[in-house]
Amino acid sequence: MEDIAFLISAEKITLEKMEKAFGSARLPEDIPELQEAFMRAIPAVKSIIQANTL
């Protein structure tokens, strides 16, 4: 998550941009573990973005 936090702060990524990206992400349907990991990561990424916008 440190890499994600760095990219969010360096690129000034907004929650609106990430919401759009989350919605358009395409994950392989035949790898449920990847889908689960992606869904678990979303709240953490949103928290990082919110912390960087304070």
Image: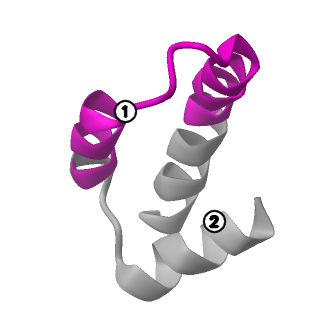
Q: Which residues are magenta?
A: 17-43
Q: Is residue 41 left or right of residue 29?
A: right
Residue nearest the observer in this picture, 35 or 53: 35
Residue 4 image label: 2
Q: How many marks?
A: 2
Q: Give the SS element for disc 2.
A: helix
- Can you give x and y, in whole percent of width and height, for residue 15 in the image? 32, 48
Specify the amino acid type for callout 1. Arg
Q: Is 26 a magenta residue?
A: yes
User: Dot 2: within a 10 Å radius of its alpha carbon, few (fewer than 14), some, or many (20 or more) residues?
Assistant: few
User: Where does label 1 land, which residue?
Assistant: 26
Q: Give the SS element for disc 1.
A: loop
| Callout in the foreground (2, 1) | 1
User: Dot 1: within a 10 Å radius of its alpha carbon, few (fewer than 14), some, or many (20 or more) residues?
Assistant: few
Q: Where 9 falls versus 47 (above or below)?
A: below
Magenta stretch: dominant secondary structure: helix
Question: Splitting the image into 4 quarters, where does residue 6 fall?
Answer: bottom right
Q: Residue at x 60, y 54 (%)?
A: 48
